[in-house]
Amino acid sequence: MLRDFKAYIRKEDLFAESDRILLAVSGGVDSIAMVRLFKDAGLNFGIAHSNFGLRGEESDGDEDFVRNLATELGVPFHVTHFDTKQFAAGQKISIQMAARDLRYEWFNEVLTQNGYNYIATAHHLDDQAETFFINILRGAGISGMHGILPKQGKIIRPLMFTTRERISSFALDLQLAWREDRSNKSRKYLRNKLRLDVLSELYKINPQFSHKLNDSINHLRDVESIYNSHIAGITADLVQNTPAGILISIDWIYEYEPHDTYLFELLKPYGFTFAVVKEIVHSLDTFSGKIFYSQTHRLLRDRENFIIQPLKDLKTESLFKEIYSINRETTKIDNPIQLEIFETSEIDGLQMGKPSIACIDTEKLVFPLQLRKWEKGDWFMPLGLKGKKKLSDFFIDQKFSLAEKEKTWLLVSGNDIVWVIGKRIDNRFRITSKTKSAFVISCADEPKEPEKPSCGCSLFFS
């Protein structure tokens, strides 16, 4: 066992002999066997134990047992206590997931604060088999098929060469003491049910089942590596970062089969599940404007693109209605958009007709002016057209996406829209032959996120 342990560490290049390793030790047979192998191999290690407080006196007994082992071996001992149930309830996740998140966050703290190089867990081939089938039952993609990796960042699994049965035999032969967790016998947990009812039958068919499955998983890892390289190339070509959000051209989807799988891989970084991706693909045969959500992002199916935006950005914008006030003396605004402002009586030299510059008759303005987002029912009289036009209809004519509408700002005088900024001024405020003084405003091409307004402009909320 010790020979195979050392060979596996070398084969997978898990760590250097001089490295300090933090062992995650629960007190169960697997982690106790790992401690013994590290000791017999003469490696430099410390022990970390998490008390999740889920089994009362049993949990405290596990802690005392592991502390005594560390004392006996003369190695550093690190322990912490978690209110796992409260954390799980607050995060709305399962107890098992809460315990995992808490444990690894704390392990990383201990590692960085105490000069360890890696964290070692006692996962073995049977754990890998259980994880593999759990992922299949949950409908995981190819990334769920690669099993438990021997090395993942700062986490190493030095027992992934062997089985639970061999580890137990090793511990019995050396007369090691360990703690039994009664919850491992409970079938209310999916992992236990798989181990007790499903995998046990597969071992009856083939006693080498976990090794054979591990061979298959290694092949799948190679396939995944090739697959990921292909997806990375497509992502570089098709996914664009723009001020309006992440854009993915809709036209490309017809060029790649199967549509669902390709789009799922492109949208996976934004939290979209395969079920939602299938709905997005079905939306291609319907009208534009349909919206889909993941836990972190929103996707808008626009005319030509899928537009993806973080929900946190959208929530920030919808918390309040921003209204920025512009005085006659204001010369510059940096937020929420960049504006340069000046007043002049030299009308002949002005650049009129350029969308990014508004030249407005000063006498027709009521100060202070306001900058605000558009609202339902807004209308104006677009320069070059006759009569009134609803902004919603103007947006349709201009082929605005929903994201573009949400980022559009208006310059308002009194109750009248003066300028759909960067697009069109209102005909009523245009410069004429009778104009004596012009209020000239130029805008930057890309809106900025709101911060504090600069010189001469005040901010208030309604």
Image: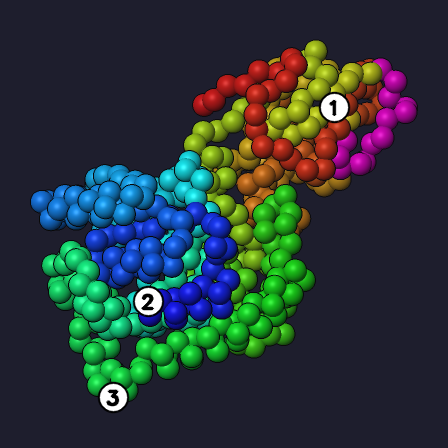
Q: Using the numbered discs, state the Cα–Cα distance from disc 1 to disc 3 in whole angstroms.
A: 78 Å
User: From what the image shows, is residue 304 above or below residue 440?
Assistant: below
Secondary element at image label 2: loop
The x, y position of residue 440, in whole percent, is: 77, 23
Which residue does the image show at 67% across and 62% down from the upper left? 237
The x, y position of residue 71, in whole percent, is: 24, 42
Is 349 included in the stretch rendered in magenta?
Answer: yes
Q: Is residue 252 visible?
A: yes
Q: Which residue is mark 2?
A: 124
Indicate left or right for 150 with 389 as reference. left
User: From what the image shows, is residue 404 above or below residue 183?
Assistant: above
User: 380 or 171: nearer the eye?
Assistant: 171
The span shown in magenta is 345-357
The x, y position of residue 278, in whole percent, is: 44, 68
Which residue does the image show at 48% across and 29% down from the upper left? 321
* Principal secondary structure, stretch drawn in magenta: loop
Q: Is residue 361 visible?
A: no
Tell me the amino acid under the disc marked 3: Ile
User: 20 or 80: nearer the eye?
Assistant: 20
Query: Mark 2 or mark 1, which has the lower sequence index?
Result: 2
Tell me the amino acid under the disc marked 1: Glu
**How many other residues sit within 10 Å of disc 2, few (<14), some (14-19) or many (≥20)?**
many
Is 60 included in the stretch rendered in magenta?
Answer: no
Q: Using the numbered discs, state the Cα–Cα distance from disc 3 to disc 2 in whole angstroms.
A: 20 Å
The circle on residue 340 is 1
The circle on residue 205 is 3
Which residue does the image show at 33% across and 67% down from the upper left? 124
